[in-house]
Image (cartoon, helix red, strand yellow):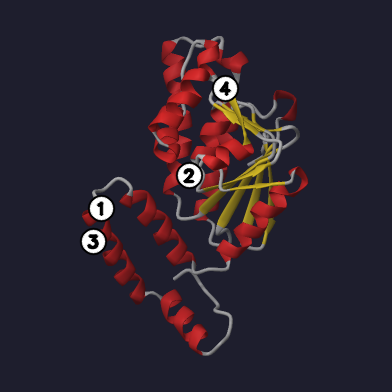
Amino acid sequence: MALEFLKIQDEGFVRLVTISRPKALNALNTGVLAELMAEMQRAEADPGCRVVVLTGEGKAFVAGGDIAQMSEMNPAQALKYAEQGHALMRFMEGMTKVVIAAINGYALGGGSELALGCDIVIASRSAKIGQPEVKLGIIPGFGGTQRLARVVGRNAAKEWVLTGDMYTAEQAMRIGFVNKVVDDDKVVAEAMDMAKRIAANGPVAVAVAKKAINEGLQMPLNQALEYEASVFANLFDTHDQKEGTKAFLQKRTPKFEGK
């Protein structure tokens, strides 16, 4: 499929997906959302891809939803647009592959929400992050009122959403939104380096660990611990577990097959 808004580059088991709509600061219109969904589905189905790094071209990761497109929407169209964004974020969360956001500039509104749908967030030192929707007379529509509170806590989420303020990468890291802050010219390289470290691990184990964390957060602790023990035990019936333990005992690098 010819891509209008994305650039794709593979390095081993890592796929770099760059949103390329720089004149609009990579704003998420319906076309960008559709291409992102298709590419995430392709990555999920591709055994040659284990980790996706998501970034933006130019001055922004994603500056937000497409305000020009939203200005023409009626309630029914706005609902469809929100549901399209929700579907993408839910798919990313449910992927067996890991998705790392490399925030290289503005990550506002839909851009902040896109990062929240990723598993790990690396940000450039000059990045600006926030949920400014109330300044437009609306609220976050791609999960920002819900995922943000789950990631940073209720009170911090209310401050972000109700003020509409922008925050630095360091401020975002202090409340747990961002994992790591690096120099501007190193953000993609840092994300790619982390992605390659993750991709070198057992793919089945990584997928199960991601799911265990996401699923467990929705359960009471005792139920989550039982769930963890169950999926831990199931891994002992996989090729990767046999290979990983054998390689450790033989003092060699494991050759994981994702089986």
Camera sees residue 37 = no
Residue at x 75%, y 43% (from the top left corner): 184
| Label 2–label 4 contact, CB within 8 A | no
Q: Is residue 233 above or below residue 89?
A: below
Asked if residue 239 is positioned above or below residue 39 in the image, the reply reads below
Mark pair 3, 4: CA separation:
41 Å
**2 or 1: tag closer to the N-terminus:** 2
Marks 3/4 in contact by CB < 8 Å: the verdict is no
Left or right: where 57 falls relative to 134: right
Along the viewing direction, whichever of 169 and 95 lies nearer the viewer: 169
Q: CA distance from mark 4 to mark 1?
A: 34 Å
Residue at left 39%, top 38%?
A: 150
Residue highlighted by disc 3 = 226
Residue under pointer 1? 221
Q: Counting residues from the N terminus, which is met first, the one under dot 3 or under dot 4?
A: 4
Q: Residues within 10 Å of mark 3 (few under 14, many from 20)?
A: few
* Image quadrant occupied by the N terminus: top right
Q: Amino acid at mark 4?
A: Asp
Say which amino acid is labelled 3.
Glu
Residue positioned 47% across, 24% down in the render: 159
Instruction: Measure how far apart labels 2 and 3 are at the Cα level.
Output: 25 Å
Disc 2 to disc 1, how far (Cα)?
Answer: 24 Å
Mark 2 is on which residue type?
Met
The reply to whether the C-beta atoms of the residues labelled 2 and 3 are less than 8 Å apart is no
Q: Position of residue 26 (x, y in %)?
A: 67, 30
Dot label at residue 165:
4
Nearest the eye: 159 or 197: 159
Mark 2 vs mark 3: give the one in front.
3
Q: Mark 2 highlights which residue?
A: 92
Q: Quadrant of residue 59?
A: top right
